[in-house]
Image: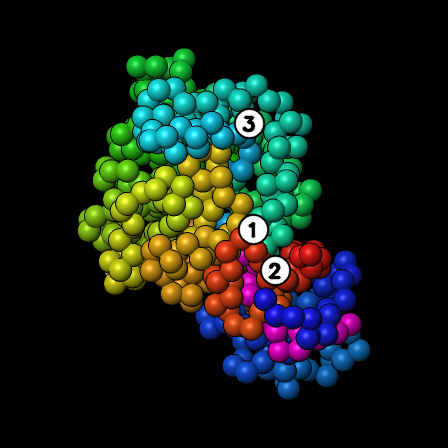
Amino acid sequence: MTADSNPPIPACASADGVWRRLRVPAGLGAVAPGGSSWVVEGGRIVWIGADAELPAAYAGRPEFDGAGRWATPGLVDCHTHLVYGGSRVQEFALRLAGADYEQIARAGGGIVATVAATRAADEQSLYAQAAPRLRALLAEGVCALEIKSGYGLELATERRQLRVARRLGADFGVAVRCTFLGAHALPPEYAGRADAYIDAVCASMLPALAAEGLVDAVDAFCERIAFTPAQVERVFIAAARLGLPVKLHAEQRSDQGGAALAARHRALSCDHLEYLGADGIAAMRAAGTVAVLLPGAYYALRDARPPPVQALRDAGVALALATDHNPGSAPVLSLLLMMNMACTLFGLSVDEALAGVTRHAARALGLQHSQGFIDAGRPANFVVWDIDAPAELAYWIGGRPRCTIVRQGRIAGAAP
Ligand code: NIG
Ligand code: FE
């Protein structure tokens, strides 16, 4: 990280004014090579251009001198399960002792263990447990994120999770997309009756939660230890009836054909994808579905098979990265660390990793018009970094460069 050689950017609540002498990595903003300025007014970027071309009309506004620093769009964490009760630290020990994720799930641990803890937690407790996790993500410059339900698996608890997700967005001034993940695992009361549970998801849970304005997208887990493609398709059809976009946890442990199915339903994204095959890639390409790579889960589960990055790249499928924060397979609270892991473990370039946590992640949430790119007409979400080169964002392990975060037009403060 760079030493304190640059003049400090003064902290104040509103980011309205002229942001001068900033550099933006290629592809992340409508900027001039060599140095850009932009003007924030009423929380939005209203002008952007070369430093020397700042219109005279903006003279006299407060000035924030970037002094040649690098700026990126606010980061977007497009796949999290941030709201849940308890932890699964004991499973960490079991995995270290040789148990694998599927064995733990089949023995009644895994997702259903968190379901029990989440059902037992009231709204206030879920909020209090999730808030520090959110703070950790925000401190790295996250300006938008997805929060999934899926640890209730019955109406009241799914509602509680989604209500907490909405409240966190409002209270922390961050864009939160709420994704209903009722088809995450089979709740114990439906043991042996998966189709009946999918009936409940489609006919009562999803319509009720959508009517309450708690659902922005619908997700499912298509896997041997979760739901079949036929069951997932029923969920997708129910989502389409309500006009909601879909996405899928697909091909994480085996190739179920989930990605191709999701792409046929014009999914925003398919996520995980370690076992994705050629058919899935072709279908995702045709549908413009984003591939969300989750290197934290891959690392934590000590998977041996990385997702087919080169084939996705060759097909022109957009690659996004996310933390997948959850208490089981990815107790991850750093999107910058995911950049590092995606480069180191999956072979992404720094430019791909940067696009993966900004532009492409925004698309995976359907937020491509407001997040993940610096341009006039958009809400002011950007981060000014104390770094020597963009690669530093993927370089540090267990630390982060200092930064000034502008989130929804407010200066959120420099990370300590
Ligand atoms: O994205 N794949 C399913 N869902 C989560 C795991 C959730 C859990 O283990 O609690 C995931 O990895
Ligand atoms: Fe997940």
Q: Which numbered disc, 1 or 3, marks the residue closer to the eye?
A: 3
Residue 10, given in percent of the width and then of the height, sits at 76, 66
How far apart are labels 1 and 3 at the CA level? Answer: 24 Å
Which structural element holds mark 2?
A: loop
Tag 1 or tag 2, which sits nearer the N-term? 1
- The residue that label 3 is drawn on is 86
Q: Is residue 149 magenta?
A: no
* Residue that appears at 63% across and 62% down: 402
Q: Secondary structure at mark 1?
A: strand
Amino acid residing under circle 1: Ala
Query: Residue at left 58%, top 69%?
Result: 387
- Magenta range is 62-75
Q: Name the residue carrying label 2.
A: 381
Disc on the earlier residue, 1 or 3: 3
- Answer yes or no: do the residues labelled 1 and 3 have beta carbons within 8 Å? no
Instruction: Work out which residue is located at the far left of the displayed protein and give it.
Output: 278
Assess whether mark 1 and mark 2 are in contact (beta carbons under 8 angstroms): yes
Q: Nearer the viewer, residue 97 or 118?
A: 97
Determine if residue 211 is in view: no
Count neighbours of disc 1 (C-alpha within 10 A) and say few if under 14, some if 14 to 19, many if 20 or more. many
Q: Which residue position holds label 1?
A: 144
- The secondary structure that dominates the magenta segment is strand
